[in-house]
Amino acid sequence: MIVKMRLPRLNRLAMTSIKHFSADHKIMKTKFFLFLLITFNFILLTCLYPSFQDIGWGVRAGSMGNSFTAVADDVSAPLWNPAGISQLEMFETTFMYNKLFAGIDNVNLNQMFVAAVYPSQMGSFGIIATDFSLWNYYKENMLSVTYSNDFSEYIKLKFPVMAGINFKYLSHTYILDKRTIDIDDPVFEKISAGAFSPDIGILLKPYNFSFGVSALNILQPDVGLKTEDKVPMIIKFGAAYHLNDWKIFENITPTFDVSYRKPNGDKADIKISGGIEIWFSYHTLGFRLGGNDREIATGFSYNKTFGKSGLQIDYGFLFPIELTATSGSHRLSLTYKYFLKR
């Protein structure tokens, strides 16, 4: 498969060739670099689903097959449904690292984010920064601030009705080495671009049910370097049911998601995901299982409380169904929690 190409070796060979070209062959050098750039983008866009293409974020969400829109009850909620942070009763901050498609030679794909949520009487506030990178080649970043509140009292409903909004900035950057920069060609004049877009979300929790809907990248921001390159809007719908405790099983939550994404000039991408989360031993140990048409997933948690604070470690394993020569993606996060009086 194309993902097995040895990209760093290809890059070194290309740059060595460029070094020996004369000044009269600038056009040839430019075309050769563009060939590498196009090849790299094909790998990302066709095979590896980068962050702007809804790869999914968060360990718990990933362990449930990336079905989290109707759950969204931890600090990663803004990445799925910004309304969800209203469910948090403690200050939370987290760091997540994801090693994507481990085992593929010379392809070093990484996904990280850091986030915090502060609940207050005026609503809940969140901030999150994400990073997706193919080291030494390409990066995608997002910075987002979130506000959410429960409006059930204002509309006189007996169950939570939460709404939230993200204000975020998306950017991506191509990383050039010194020899490429020395080409001094106008085609390399701009290597990064960014744009702003809001997200919105609603979460309803009647009785033991949860229903969530969110719209991400509403303005379809243009992050093109030379030509238009809009980030498609993503519509997510999710449903979950919270079962009563049964014997040693606690907080049993089956959930499913439907995600719709329509790039300009391309076919719509519809993804259906499902999963389940179960806790044990007074919410100390957690187990998850899930999947969709592209991957199967599982994971676990260890949650420990210390007075007014607590720590939670989450691990998730996602194995792609169609991609060979990989040992899967491995997500790990550490979350700190502290109880606050509203």
Image (cartoon, rainbow, N blue to C red):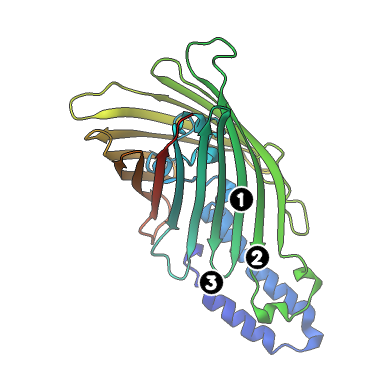
The reply to whether dot 3 and dot 1 touch (C-beta < 8 Å) is no
User: Type of residue at label 2?
Assistant: Tyr
User: Type of residue at label 3?
Assistant: Leu
**Badge 3 local density, few (<14 within 10 Å), some, or many (20+)?**
some
> How many marks overall?
3
Provide the residue designation for mark 2.
Answer: 174
Q: CA distance from mark 2 to mark 3?
A: 14 Å
**Badge 1 local density, few (<14 within 10 Å), some, or many (20+)?**
many
* Secondary structure type for disc 2: strand
User: 29 or 140, which is in the foreground?
Assistant: 140
Seen at 38% across and 39% down, the residue is 64
Q: Quadrant of residue 202?
A: top right
Dot 2 or dot 3, earlier in sequence: 3
* Secondary structure type for disc 3: helix
Q: Position of residue 91 (x, y in %)?
A: 46, 39
User: Type of residue at label 1?
Assistant: Met
Q: Quadrant of residue 184?
A: bottom right
Q: CA distance from mark 3 to mark 1?
A: 25 Å
Provide the residue designation for mark 1.
Answer: 142
